[in-house]
Amino acid sequence: MQEYIDFARNNFLIVAAFIAVLGFIIKSEISRLTQKYKQVGVNEAVLILNKDNSVVLDVREDKEIQGGKIQGAKHITLAQLPSRIAELGSDKEAPILVYCRSGSRSAHACQLLTKAGYENVANLTGGILAWESANLPVVRV
């Protein structure tokens, strides 16, 4: 046991960095396990799109959608989402597929939607980049 204490004293920065990384990993895993939305790949996203009452939400910035978007997607930037959330409809149980460029901003949008009471929210893992990589269609704006 004394060897561990000596190591920690002699290598304080290494031990501190290890504790910081370990804390980050634990926080990330707790966050992932307690999230109220699903992470879906492109195949499952297509299944969601094929449901009758599904909503597709693109949270990218205005200039980003010029390259194309998923057909039927409603475009509301992440910054505008809190004030325009009512545009998604009153059916809180309808499936909502949210995407951005890579899946990061859309994860934040999913958190906002679940806090607003939407129950069936999914984040497209990899965003529009994953969609296009799978050779799925986009419509030009």
Image (cartoon, helix red, strand yellow):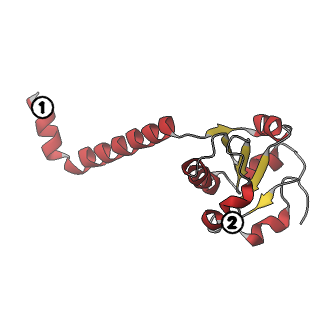
* Residue nearer the viewer, 41 or 11: 41
Q: Nearer the viewer, mark 1 or mark 2?
A: 2
Q: Is residue 120 above or below residue 59?
A: above
Q: Position of residue 119 (x, y in %)?
A: 63, 40
Which residue type carries mark 2? Thr
Q: Position of residue 57 (x, y in %)?
A: 74, 54
Cα separation, mark 1 vs mark 2, equals 55 Å
Quadrant of residue 92 in the image?
top right
Which residue type carries mark 1? Glu
Question: Dot 1 lies on which element?
Answer: helix
Q: Which mark sits nearer the N-terminus, 1 or 2?
A: 1
Q: Quarter holding the N terminus?
A: top left
Q: Position of residue 62 (x, y in %)?
A: 75, 71
Q: Horizontal placement of 90 versus 36: left or right?
A: right
Q: Position of residue 128 (x, y in %)?
A: 76, 52
Tally of numbered discs: 2
Specify the farthest residue to the top.
1
> Residue sitting at 81 percent across and 34 percent down?
47
Residue tagged by mark 2? 77
Numbered tag placed on residue 3 in the rendering: 1
